[in-house]
Image (spheres, rainbow, N blue to C red):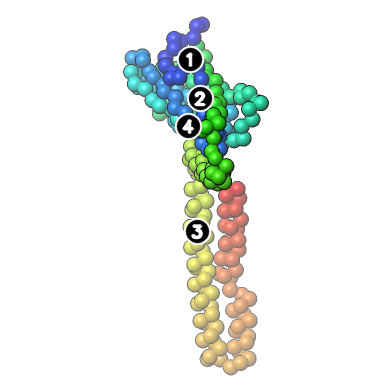
Amino acid sequence: MAKTEQVLILEPQHELKFKGPFTDVVTTNLKLSNPTEKNVCFKVKTTAPRRYCVRPNSGVIDAGSSINVSVMLQPFDYDPNEKSKHKFMVQSMYAPPDTSDMEAVWKEAKPEDLMDSKLRCLFELPSENDKPHEGDTNKVLSSSVSKTESSSMFKSISSSLDDPEQKKLLEDNKRLQTDLQRLREEYKQLKEEDGLRMRKLQASSNPVSSSTSLVKDEGLNPRILALAVLLFIIGVIIGKVAL
């Protein structure tokens, strides 16, 4: 059975251009237009998902409207002798009545209902006049490192928030940290109460009975022992969740 007619217009149509130097994030915009009278679902895929950050990478475009997709190339060491094989593909289809669960929509889509549009990546190096002067090299490198770390952190956080399992782990980690703080405060309060009680016993008892009571209170307070063990267990759990 033949595939469906093309339902999206891509601007540009054949390639995504990225202009160097590639010491910083380079952003290229991809415009997706829906000329049809129906809503259209789209999904952007790439052969190098770790090299690019795409926002939005999927969604629904209303009939007769368009959307801009930002394709952000992460900083990397460019080798002019190596030809890039990075490619992008925009997959599209007419949107069903219910688009509340997009994962299920794409999973249940039939091959003949899908339309694929492919784009190749083109890297352009700056000319000699555009290259930074030697005096600005350290400044460029410093800015590159800082922005690389920021972009990597942003990508990691975005990925975590998009993943329901990662989001649940973050919520559990936050809850465990709150419980740990509360237990620490209770443990501190119990220690203060025990210290006050022992000082009172020392003031009101003779040296022999005071010494005996002190040994008993130090070695046999089950609440403090239980809190100490619980603090240790929650600390181990938070460590595993953070990893």
Quadrant for residue 69, please give it. top left
- Of 11 and 109, nearer the camera is 11
In the figure, residue 96 lies in which quadrant?
A: top left
Instruction: Please give the name of the residue rendered at 57% of the width and 57% of the height, measured from the top-left corner.
Output: 234
Q: Secondary structure at mark 1?
A: strand
Is label 3 in contact with label 4 (beta carbons under 8 Å)? no
What residue sits right under mark 4 in the picture?
27
Q: From this viewpoint, is residue 36 visible?
A: yes
Question: In the drawing, what numbered circle is on residue 179?
Answer: 3
Relative vertical location of residue 217 with respect to residue 125 in this rendering, above or below: below
Q: Is residue 90 above or below residue 190?
A: above
Left/right of residue 190 with respect to residue 39 in the rendered view: right
The residue carrying mark 1 is 115
**Residue in the foreground of this view, choosing between 90 and 240:** 90
In three-dimensional space, the C-alpha distance between marks 1 and 4, rounded to whole angstroms, equals 25 Å
Q: Amino acid at mark 3?
A: Asp
Q: Are marks 2 and 1 in contact (CB under 8 Å)?
A: no
Q: Residue at x 58, y 73 (%)?
A: 221
Disc number lying in front (2 or 1): 2
Give, as a three-letter code, the residue at label 1: Met
Label 1, label 3: how far apart the Cα atoms are: 51 Å
Residue 67 image position (x, y, % from top left): 38, 25
Q: Residue furthest right?
A: 81
Give whichever of discs 2 and 4 has the lower sequence position.
Answer: 2
Q: Nearer the viewer, mark 2 or mark 3?
A: 2
Q: Earlier in the sequence, mark 1 or mark 4?
A: 4
Whether residue 69 sits left or right of residue 230 in the image: it is left
Residue marked by disc 2: 17
